[in-house]
Amino acid sequence: MGFKLPSFNLFKGKPGQAALTGSTTRLGLNTTLVMKGLQKMAGDTGQPLPLIGEKPLKQQLKMLFVAWVVTVILTLLPAIWYGVNQYILMYQISDATTLQMLSQRLAKAGQQAAQGSPVAFAQLKAADERFFRELKDLAQGGGGEGLMPAAPAALQPLLKDVSKQWVEMHGDIKQVLSQEKNLIELSNNVAGVNASSEALLELTELLAGQLIQAGEGVREVSAARQMGMVTQRIAKNANILLLSGSDSDLDEAFLQGRSLAIFRNSLVGLENGTGGLLLKPAKDPDAREMLGQIDVATKDFAKDVEQILKNIQGLAAAKDAQRSLFKDGDKMLDLTRKLTDGLKKNASSGVVESILTVILASLALTFAALFAKVLLDDAKRKAAISERENKQNQEAILRLLNEMGDLAEGDLTVSAKVTEDITGAIADSINYAIDELRSLVVGVNKATEQVTKASGEAQVTSDQLLQASEKQSREIEETSTAVLQMADSINQVSANAAESAKVAQQSLQAADKGAVAVQNSIAGMNEIRGQIQETAKRIKRLGESSQEISEIVELISDITEQTNILALNAAIQAASAGEAGRGFTVVAEEVQRLAERSGEATKQIGAIVKTIQTDTHDAVAAMEQSTQGVVEGAKLSDAAGQALSEIERVTRSLADLIDTISKATQAQAEAAGKVATNMQDIQDITNQTTDGTRQTAASVGQLTELAAELKGSVAGFKLA
């Protein structure tokens, strides 16, 4: 829960406020007069400061600076003192206001905790601990990281009353916290009773209706309805106990055990006719099923009620402590309000601190103005000295300029007068410069004569070099034309060689394709030969198998003949047996017929097998002839492949030779092209050399003219 500190005016209603305003005004007027006096003193550079005016400048500035620093520090001390006191006061007022808030939070949290709220117990404990810390900070100091002092001595008796009241509240808080588990269980049990009572009320009403439909007695129906009313009375008393917890409520809570016993007796009476209520057991199946449901629902209901009765004594003590805590919260609120008002009344007006600050600030401003005056006087004194020196220097410079008038007209025989003033060094330097300039003019005259002579000789040489360059350029141009023609011829030969190489390469590719085709034909014939040989082997195996079948057929034929003989013997034996062997005679005849049919089938199979053997022998012979033809074809294909390989080898050699000729011709063409390019570069360089020679000849002519102009420019100087 947040809170807002009360706002107040420290000067409201203070008689010293008017005095502070008047003092500040008077001090401002005095400061203005001091500044005007200092400005008047600053205008007179010859008037030194009293007491320290005769001291050196640095010492004066040092003393004034130290005085200014000291007054500034002293100016800040009252403001800092006032600010610290105000901060301490605001911190203590904040603590007192927090105590007001916590007194109400303790009462509210205690009430919620007594109703079984788990969150309220944590809030109650935290508020109790924080109240103790805030109260300790005000009574003993140590708040704000241990820097805050205790409250003023005038408020200590009030703090003792607050501490005494907190001790009483702390005891109640401990009592409530000690019953945390029981109170939370009470809340849960009451919630369980409420839920179970609603279910039991619905079931008992349904039971009463079912008993009426079944034609049960009035006593039994009344007992069922009374059970519903008992559950509601128990739930009502449990909720009153949770929310209030007065002595009368506790008495009502003790009656819950009796109500629960009445409910159980009614339930037992309706189930089996016992319980002391003279009830008849219900006979209707639906009614008995409902009684079973009520019995199941009663278990949790009875468990919650019994748990409430078990903890009733501890709950009574906690409820008493909560009511006492709620009453003490109002008393604590009044005490903390008085504490807050006392701290506000103890606030300082700040009049004395403000007056001291204004006075010391005026002194600091005065020392700063004196510091500025000393600096200004020193600057004016230095300016006067500099003005006198500048005037003397100007006079000396004018005198020096008059002496140098002939030098401006080119007279190098003059010299300046060397004096001891600022122009003495300048005059000496000018005399040295005149001597050097005279030597320079003499040297320029000599140099111009030498340049004129040398430029004439260079002019003749340049003309000769120009003629040679032009001749060389013409000869190089002719050579370049011949080289370009030769390069064109070589390029034509190279193109023809490249075309021949291309044709040879195509022939080589055709030979390669023919060789590949022959190789593929040989491979195909070899594969056909292998397949024919494999087929011949299979046909031979087929002939061998048919031979085995023929042998088996002969064996079957022998068995058939034996069977026929045995059947005949059996028929004879059956005939000799008379009537008893008649049935066996039929079987013997049937066996004989089967033997004859088997013999005929065996003969047919034998004929077929012989035909297969004949065809197999013919097929093997045909396969051998085919194999021989494939072998001959493979030999011919191999010979053709060897011929194509020889053609390929010759064609490859021819292609390599033509390719070598083409590359050599191409290399010659490239070399001829490079020679032509180099000749063209030489031609360009020769042209550039010719142009340079012309420019050199022109430059030599210009140099001759410049030498003449230079000689004329120094002709105006007077050397002797």
Image (spheres, rainbow, N blue to C red):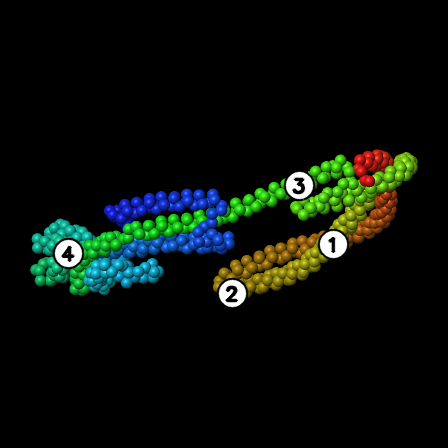
Residue 571 image offset from top left, x and y in percent: 55, 62
Residue 397 - label: 3
User: How many angstroms separate mark 4 from mark 2 (CA)?
Assistant: 120 Å
User: How many angstroms separate mark 4 from mark 1 (CA)?
Assistant: 113 Å
Q: Name the residue under label 1.
A: 530
Q: Which residue is drawn at 29% across and 55% down?
A: 89
Q: Which of marks 4 and 2 is in front?
A: 4
Q: Earlier in the sequence, mark 4 or mark 2?
A: 4
In this orientation, does residue 339 appear? yes
Q: Name the residue under label 4.
A: 237
User: What amino acid does circle 1 point to?
Assistant: Gly
Q: Which residue is drawn at 72% across and 57% down?
A: 537
Q: Nearer the viewer, mark 1 or mark 3?
A: 3
Q: Which of marks 2 and 1 is in front?
A: 1
User: How many angstroms separate mark 3 from mark 2 (CA)?
Assistant: 188 Å
User: What amino acid does circle 4 point to?
Assistant: Asn
Task: Sort mark 1 into few (<14), some (14-19) or many (20+) by Cα contacts within 10 Å.
Answer: some
Residue placed most toward the observer, 535 or 369: 369
CB contact under 8 Å: marks 4 and 3: no
Left or right placement of residue 682 versus residue 190 in this view: right
Q: Earlier in the sequence, mark 2 or mark 1?
A: 1
Residue 362 image offset from top left, x and y in percent: 38, 49
Q: Which of marks 4 and 3 is nearer the N terminus?
A: 4
Q: Name the residue under label 2.
A: 577
Left or right placement of residue 413 versus residue 147 in this view: right
User: How many angstroms separate mark 4 from mark 3 (CA)?
Assistant: 123 Å
CB contact under 8 Å: marks 1 and 3: no
Residue 148 image offset from top left, x and y in percent: 32, 59
